[in-house]
Image (tube, rainbow, N blue to C red):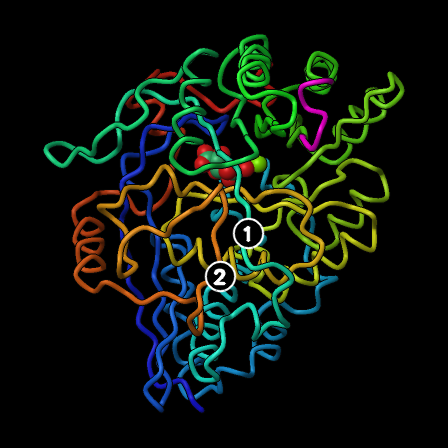
């Protein structure tokens, strides 16, 4: 079998004005849909980061992919990324939003190709992707309610504004309202709050109110994306020692493996064992080894989109298991193709110890490119469909609409600081640590 064509579909999808320590989400998030066809007429799809950077990197791969056997992926990975020990640590990730880090440029590009090839292979052998990569260990994958502080608005621009399902969420009471609404609709059984936006005392209060509202058996996590100093991280860890117990965690409270190691040491010496998780300080295999050595991080947030695809994620799952670390999954704004890729790989990772993150509730049914509409959740979980490949097909009219939206908007890169300056505070700057 040979790859006979590669088509890239740049699209824009509405995104509400969500806040994080990076700034503010733009009215549209950018994605790229990758379509790979074989000479025997089978097509595989994947979804990845959008805009000029990812698109250009994938475009440049076309000559190498045409004529390549889609089963032969290991050699392509090797030639793109070199040996894994050459991959440097992820320091610039502290400053750059995921998808913009030059350190994982090649693993991101490879992942988009690998996942589309696996979809194609699954269709060719009439098996779901999770079986192709070694076999599922679970039939459904649990996701968490991913709460954000946000301004009013549902995303979109001008006359093409989208409905705002959740309203403004800028205080603890509104956070509980957002959680109730999201859990009612999707049935999530774990909660993650994106922090690093309000004063730490208000974010502590948000977590406390969530605990009061949902009880001690719903695990809670908070992720300020490094907005806190090491001292503040310790203070928050102390204040929330009960709320973040029972399967919760503290995610990237401060910057860097050293800072987290010190915060962890100070908390454990107080008898507080809340685990730390990371998708900022730990973005490559050498980072995992360092994090384990210094006990900076106990849970790695994997993400097939930038860790180098599904098989690299399985290696990561095994490595974390070997090192006694837990595994969860990170997410960025995405549609159903990404959600199904995340679900398939999570189903085939034995060491997956937490519900995965997903931004999916923040995207609109109006933008879904999967035929049949939005992927369904039952009790916060997505089931592996009884279909080959990723188990999805494309709604071509919807994909064309996504491409039209992309052509209409002026930007080609995520820039949360610029959005923040334009809509909230003209002098806003990402400062780390902010508190
Ligand atoms: O979408 O603003 C956001 C998130 O902060 C995202 O960029 C992060 O990658 O969800 C992420 C995380 O750090 O967990
Ligand atoms: Mg995070």
Residue projecting furthest to the right: 269
Counting from the top left corner in percent of width and height, residue 23 is at: 43, 27
Identify the residue shown where x is 55% and y is 35%. 189
Residue 384's tag is 2
**Residue in the foreground of this view, choosing between 113 and 168:** 168
Residue 380's label in the rendered image is none
Tell me if residue 133 comes above or below residue 300 in the rendering: below
The outermost residue toward the left is 159
Quadrant location of the C terminus?
Answer: top right
Picture residue at 80% right of the left edge, 31% below the top = 261
Q: Is residue 377 left or right of residue 301?
A: left
Q: Residue at x 45, y 58 (%)?
A: 340
Q: Are marks 1 and 2 in contact (CB under 8 Å)?
A: yes
Specify whether residue 16 is in view. Answer: yes
Task: Please name the residue that numbered disc 1 is placed on.
Answer: 141
At label 2, counting other C-alpha atoms closer than 10 Å, the crowd grade (few under 14, some 14-19, many 20 or more) is many
Which region of the structure is painted magenta?
Answer: 242-248
Where residue 313 sits: x, y (%)?
A: 63, 59
Mark 2 residue element: loop
Earlier sequence position, callout 1 versus callout 2: 1
Left or right position of 289 against 106: right
Q: Is mark 2 within 8 Å of ligand 1?
A: no
Residue 303 relative to residue 319: left or right: left
């Amino acid at each position: 079998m040979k790859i006979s064509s590669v088509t890239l579909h740049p699209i824009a999808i509405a995104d509400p004005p969500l806040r994080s320590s990076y700034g503010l989400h733009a009215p549209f998030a950018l994605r790229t849909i990758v379509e790979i066809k074989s000479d025997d007429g089978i097509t595989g799809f994947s979804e990845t980061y959008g805009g000029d950077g990812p698109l250009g990197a994938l475009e440049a791969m076309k000559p190498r992919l045409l004529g390549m056997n889609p089963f032969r992926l290991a050699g392509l990975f090797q030639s793109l990324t070199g040996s894994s020990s050459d991959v440097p640590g992820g320091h610039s990730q502290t400053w750059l939003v995921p998808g913009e880090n030059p350190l994982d440029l090649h693993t991101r590009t490879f992942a988009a190709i690998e996942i589309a090839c696996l979809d194609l292979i699954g269709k060719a052998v009439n098996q779901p992707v999770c079986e192709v990569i070694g076999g599922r260990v679970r039939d459904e994958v649990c996701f968490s309610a991913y709460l954000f502080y946000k301004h009013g608005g549902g995303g979109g621009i001008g006359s093409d504004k989208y409905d705002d399902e959740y309203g403004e969420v800028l205080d603890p009471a509104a956070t509980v309202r957002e959680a109730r609404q999201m859990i009612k609709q999707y049935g999530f059984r774990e909660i993650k709050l994106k922090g690093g936006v309000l004063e730490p005392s208000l974010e502590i209060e948000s977590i406390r109110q969530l605990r009061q509202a949902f009880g001690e058996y719903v695990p809670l996590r908070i992720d300020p994306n490094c907005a806190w100093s090491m001292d503040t991280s310790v203070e928050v860890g102390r204040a929330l020692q009960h709320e973040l117990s029972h399967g919760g965690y503290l995610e990237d409270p401060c910057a860097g493996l050293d800072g987290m190691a010190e915060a962890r040491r100070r908390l454990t010496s107080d008898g507080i064992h809340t685990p730390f998780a990371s998708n900022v300080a730990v973005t490559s295999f050498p980072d995992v080894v360092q994090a384990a050595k210094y006990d900076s991080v106990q849970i790695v947030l994997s993400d097939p989109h930038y860790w180098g695809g599904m098989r690299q994620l399985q290696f990561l799952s095994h490595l974390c298991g070997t090192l006694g670390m837990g595994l969860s999954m990170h997410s960025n704004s995405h549609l159903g193709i990404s959600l199904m890729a995340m679900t398939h790989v999570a189903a085939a990772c034995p060491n997956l110890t937490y519900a995965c993150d997903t931004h999916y509730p923040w995207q609109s049914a109006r933008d879904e490119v999967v035929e049949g509409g939005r992927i369904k959740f039952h009790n916060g979980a997505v089931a592996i469909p009884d279909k080959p490949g990723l188990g999805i097909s494309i709604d071509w009219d919807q994909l064309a609409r996504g491409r039209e939206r992309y052509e209409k908007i002026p930007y080609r890169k995520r820039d949360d600081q610029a959005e923040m300056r334009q809509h909230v505070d003209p002098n806003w700057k990402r400062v780390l640590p902010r508190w």
